[in-house]
């Protein structure tokens, strides 16, 4: 059996450099002929998989959410010929791994790939691009891809917090119209996210028990711009109390939605810049990704 091992050597604190030989040896012991490729440039992985992906029985990717996004993008372009995916999380936050119960211990994650079960996971589509767990716009969404990698390696999650504080003065709202399931909402929003995850930015989502990664639905939450100090305090209170029915929070589940703005809005897809558009069509691709997860 042939296995392609894709490694982002700079992800997280670059711990994979100390674990790679052990993991490769583990794969070989279990009957795989392993080909290793360390990533050299952004968006390189989809091109690699386009050329050679069909030759392998298993694709294993090691890196953060951005590396995973590139791998999923490449695999789903192979359509029915895509081999299963194994994921060894090595990023700073690793939201997707948390949602699927994949171990943050690299060796344990590798063992779970070999002994795990196949799970058919929903994947989001933003215009013509795939995202594994989140598409977002507005306040702080650029923090993950604007924070220098060396700061992430040195400070871990604290690097995101510091970068977020630095951006407080530049927060702006966007006037957006949202169409979904035959209804329309409109308003000025500070932040919006469309997700398929029980963890966002390392924080567990409140109604985790009601979120399924294979139900054909995306979770949507938008935060309205408060008009005055009193409304800002009410908004903060609603967020802290996780009151999803607050007048300042618009939340729903859907398989498809369209957002239209008065100006181009920058979006983040799985922690990486996804482009700036005035109109975004977002939908779910049900059970599109074949991924190995722990049996427990």
Image: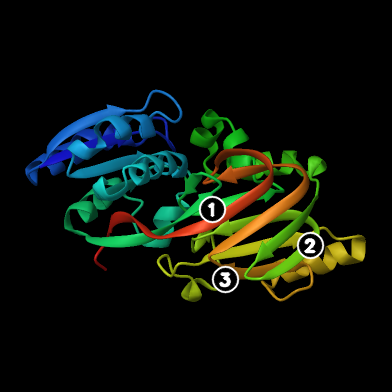
Residue identified by numbered label 1: 134
Mark 1 in CB contact with mark 2 (< 8 angstroms) = no
Helix or strand or loop: what does disc 1 sit on? strand
Query: In x, y percent, where is residue 203?
Result: 55, 59
Left or right position of 255 against 64: right
Could you give the CA–CA distance between mark 3 and mark 2, rounded to whole angstroms? Answer: 25 Å
Which residue is found at the position 45% from the left and 51% from the top? 132
Which tag, 3 or 2, sits closer to the chain's start? 2
Q: Earlier in the sequence, mark 1 or mark 2?
A: 1
Residue 8's tag is none
What crowding class fits label 1: few (fewer than 14 Cα within 10 Å), some (14-19), or many (20 or more)? many
- In front: 37, or 158? 37
Q: How far apart in space, not on screen, are marks 1 and 3 (Cα)?
A: 16 Å
What residue did someone put label 3 on?
A: 206
Q: How is the image coloured?
A: rainbow
Determine the secondary structure under disc 3: loop
Frontmost residue, 283 versus 133: 283
Occupied quadrant, residue 119: bottom left
Query: Residue at the spot x=57%, y=30% of the render?
Result: 148
Residue 186 is labelled as 2
Residue 3: x and y, percent?
18, 39
């Amino acid at each position: 059996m042939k296995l392609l091992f894709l490694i982002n050597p700079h992800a997280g604190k670059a711990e994979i450099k100390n674990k790679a030989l052990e993991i490769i040896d583990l794969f070989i012991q279990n009957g795989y002929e392993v080909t290793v490729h360390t990533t050299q440039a952004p968006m390189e992985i989809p091109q690699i998989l386009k050329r050679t992906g069909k030759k392998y029985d298993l694709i294993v990717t090691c890196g953060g959410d951005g590396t995973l996004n590139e791998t999923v993008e490449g695999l789903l372009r192979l359509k029915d010929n895509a081999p299963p995916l194994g994921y060894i999380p090595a990023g700073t936050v690793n939201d997707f791994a948390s949602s699927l119960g994949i171990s943050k211990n690299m060796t344990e994650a590798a063992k779970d790939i070999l002994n795990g079960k196949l799970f058919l996971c929903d994947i989001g589509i933003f215009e013509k691009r795939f995202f594994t767990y989140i598409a977002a716009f507005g306040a702080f969404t650029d923090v993950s891809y604007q924070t220098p990698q060396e700061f992430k390696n040195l400070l871990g999650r604290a690097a995101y917090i510091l970068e977020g504080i630095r951006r407080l003065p530049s927060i702006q709202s966007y006037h957006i119209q949202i169409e979904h399931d035959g209804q329309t909402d409109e308003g000025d929003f500070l932040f919006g996210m469309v997700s398929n995850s029980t963890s966002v930015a390392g924080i567990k989502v409140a109604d985790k028990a009601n979120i399924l990664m294979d139900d054909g639905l995306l979770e949507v939450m938008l935060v309205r711009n408060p008009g005055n100090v009193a409304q800002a305090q009410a908004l903060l209170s609603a967020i802290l109390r996780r009151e999803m029915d607050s007048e300042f929070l618009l939340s729903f589940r859907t398989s498809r939605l369209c957002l239209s703005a008065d100006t181009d809005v920058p979006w983040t897809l799985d922690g990486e810049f996804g482009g700036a558009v005035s109109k975004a069509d977002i939908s779910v691709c049900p059970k599109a990704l074949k991924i190995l997860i722990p049996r427990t």
